[in-house]
Each structure stands twice: as structure tokens, then as C-alpha cells.
Image (spheres, coloured by chain):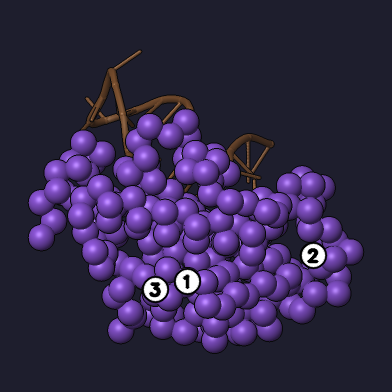
Chain colours: A purple, B brown
Amino acid sequence: MPNTNANSIVVLDFETTGLSPQQGDRAIEIGAVKIVDGIVVDSFQELMNPGRPVSTFIAEYTGITNAMLRTAAPCDEVMDSFADFIGDENLLAHNASFDKKFLDAEFARINHNYVGEFACTLLTSRRIYQDAPNHKLGTLVNYKNLAEDGTFHRALFDAEMTAKLWLKILEDISEEYFLDNIDFKLIQKLSLLPKAKVAKFLQTYR
DNA sequence: TGCCAGGCCCTCTTTAGGGCCTT
């Protein structure tokens, strides 16, 4: 059984060759941080060789070039190490449906199953920060004045920024609705509510 | 040959269409 505390979680981000593993796209980089009780206690970052060149668009978008990938370990090897990193923790990503489909596809190739469930900062922030100009990761980092020192669209940096956003979301919910020990299931439930029902849900929680 | 992601979410909706997000 995965840990149920929202404060113990692995935040992950993939860079990939494209948008769809079902269309043959592969992961080219995985970045992740492990958070325990609001503190980043571990991190993981690896480039991985997908076995074929990346497009000019992807190289420009991510800064990850074919020259960099040529010397990287193959996806299977990196994903095997990453399986050890995530253990049985619950997982978090910004637009988690995207990262989940690549995680599932890459893990399927090495016959690995994981027990953790996903939460999503995109779905959560759409409900908690309804006044944000949009809900892109970079916009939300600026909107909440979260310190940034790095380059977006690299896996570890995006995972670190997603982690900061997650902790800010927990802090804001905790302060506004007087909740402590926010449960992972609460966030999952919240993330699928109609926006108009979010405030009442949190006000009446416990 | 022609097609080409997909889940969420809103609305001029539900016998549907299009924008938002991720690379």
C-alpha cells in the first residue's frame, strides 16, 4: 500500500521525444525529487537514450541534443534505477496524465509495476488558484512568487518547481481552510470536483 | 490514402466542439 500522507511524495517530470507513447514517443530524461514533511530529501536526474534521434523541435524545446543522448544510458537501464527511487511512494506531476502515460509505457517495457497513485498540480491549481492567468507551470511559479533558479523544460528543474508549487498549494489550503495533515486522498478528491464546489468541500472537510 | 495524443473542462452541451496543458 502506498503512503497516504500528502507530505511524503515523489515529484517527477519527463522530457520526451513527443506527446504520445502510443505513437512511438519515448522518454529522453527523467527528473524527480522526493519530499518528506515539506522538505526535499532526495533527487534523481538522468538522460536516457531512446535509440533514435530527437527532432529539431524537441532539441530546441528542451535543450537536450542528440549529442547529449548518444552517450546516455538506454531507457531500460535508467527506468530500472528510477523504479528503485520511487519505491512505493505516491507520485505527483504537473499535468500528471502526461507523465503517467510515459511512466506506464516505459515501465511496461521493463515489466515493472508500481503501487503509488498520482496527484496533479495542474488539476489542483485550476481549483485552488482560479484567478491565475493560466495554469502552465511557469506561470504558476511566477504567480505564487516561488523562487526559481534554472531552466524550464529540463526534467529536474521542472520537478523541483512542481514540488515548490505543491508545497505552496498545501500551505495555502492549510492556511485558508484551517486544515493540518492534509491527506493525499483529499487532494485527489479535490482535483476532480467542479470548481464551484471546491470552497464548500474544503470548508466542511472535518 | 489519409489519418495522426488524450484527459480535463467549459459551454452557444449531452445526437458536440474547442481550448488548455504536457513534449
Residue assigned mark 2: A52
Instruction: Mark 3 and mark 1 in contact? Answer it, CB < 8 Å.
Output: yes
Question: Is A58 or A111 nearer to us in this picture?
Answer: A58
Of the image marks 3 and 2, the number of the one nearer the N terminus:
3
Where does the C terminus of chain A fall, quadrant-wise? bottom left
Q: Residues within 10 Å of mark 2 (few under 14, many from 20)?
A: few
The amino acid type of the residue labelled 2 equals Arg
The amino acid type of the residue labelled 3 equals Asp
Which element type, helix, strand or loop, lies under badge 2?
loop
Residue assigned mark 1: A39
Instruction: Mark 3 and mark 2 in contact? Answer it, CB < 8 Å.
Output: no
Q: Which mark is residue A37?
A: 3
Residue found at x 43% / y 57%: A166
Where is residue A143 drawn, in percent x and y? 49, 39
Where does the N terminus of chain A fall, quadrant-wise? bottom left
Residue found at x 57% / y 61%: A160
Question: Distance from label 3 to label 2 (Cα)?
Answer: 40 Å
- What subunit carries mark 1? A
Question: Is A48 or A121 nearer to us in this picture?
Answer: A121
**B16 w.r.t. A78: above or below:** above
Residue found at x 29% / y 75%: A4
Residue A113, located in which quarter of the rendered image?
Answer: bottom left
Residue A51, located in which quarter of the rendered image?
Answer: bottom right
